[in-house]
Amino acid sequence: MKASAFSYTRASSVTDALDLLALHGDQAKVLSGGQSLMPALNLRLSAPALLVDIGAISELRGISESNGVLKIGALTRHVDILRSPDIAKHAPLLTEAIAYVAHPAIRNKGTIGGSLAHADPASELPACTIGLDAIIVVRGRNGERRIQAADFFTGIYETVLSPEELLVAVEMPVAKSNSAHFFHEYARRKGDYAIVGLAASGILEGDVFADLRLGFFAVGDRPLLAAASKHLTGKPVTASMLADAQAALDAELDPQEDQQASAGMRRYLARQLMARCVATLLGRPELDARPRA
């Protein structure tokens, strides 16, 4: 198939882009890296009247750190995140996760803002932002909104962004000296969509989690910040505590069933990922009950 007819314009600035979006409303679509949008256009899953290309807006690119906050511009490419020493130092979870995003050709063009705005529930980066307690910065003609990542995603390919707003940046606290992270996903092949994945960050005080954020993906219609983590914080984790946390996680999940996996399989893999994450972060392999060869 080929895309239906549309008009195209290239925005010269954020203000120019916002003016165009305000004028055309939900008849316009923003084009950044295009790695998700172009297939959707060609399959006619999306049929906008106008494409607003923001690729030339340099102020939306770049990575910086100031006063304990790491800021990533919306047009920063996946490959730039993968190679960034600042990301590796201040948000190593992103460095690890980006390597799982599709393939090099996609990572060379795709952008963090495009991935977050697209809101694919099987995507790695939305889960990373909730695992890292990130803020999504969006701008409209009436000003700027700062939205907790956990509140940004509302459904399959749906966010709180209005048609007249532009995602301009992502901000997150820099990793503390006693922080730790975990990332893993199950997929049929490297680069395929995840069957189930987990992006997690924790704060350790000795052998106790002072805080633990578990961002699951491909387990529902949006990334899930698991409330079940509360069963694992504040005191040394026991096998009984972990079992309680896994049961609570199971109650939170609402996984889909498709050609890749049944809902039951996704529930099982999510529980296993939780155990693997806790065992890895605490350095306690006995908590990971996966079968051994």
Image (tube, grey):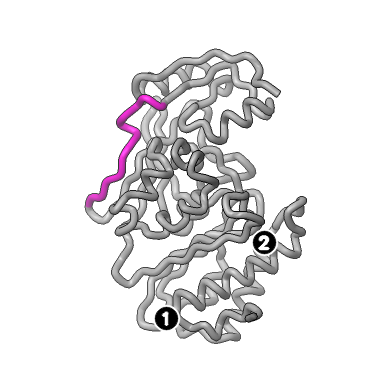
Asked whether 234 falls inside the magenta stretch, the response is no
Given residues 244 and 53, the one toward you in this image is 53
Q: Position of residue 195 (x, y in %)?
A: 65, 56
Dot 2: element: loop
Q: Position of residue 163 (x, y in %)?
A: 53, 28
Please report the residue visible at 44 percent of the width from the left and 58 percent of the height from the top: 96
Q: CA distance from mark 2 to mark 1?
A: 25 Å
| Image quadrant in which the C terminus is located | bottom right
User: Which range of residues does the magenta coloring cover?
Assistant: 55-66
Amino acid at pointer 2: Leu
Please report the residue visible at 37 percent of the width from the left and 31 percent of the height from the top: 143
**Image quarter for residue 244?**
bottom right
Given residues 13 and 88, the one toward you in this image is 88
Q: From what the image shows, is residue 250 above or below residue 4?
A: below
Please report the residue visible at 36 percent of the width from the left and 44 percent of the height from the top: 80
Amino acid at pointer 1: Val
Asked if one can make out residue 197 in the rendered structure from this viewpoint, the answer is yes
Please state if 80 lies on the left or on the right of 222 as rendered. Answer: left
Q: Position of residue 218 (x, y in %)?
A: 63, 54
Report which residue position mark 1 lands on: 208
Disc ID at residue 44 = none
| Image quadrant in which the N terminus is located | top right
**Image quarter for residue 286?**
bottom right
Q: Position of residue 200 (x, y in %)?
A: 48, 64
Dot 1: element: strand
Disc ID at residue 253 = 2
Q: Give the mark, 2 or 1, whose residue is nearer the N terminus.
A: 1
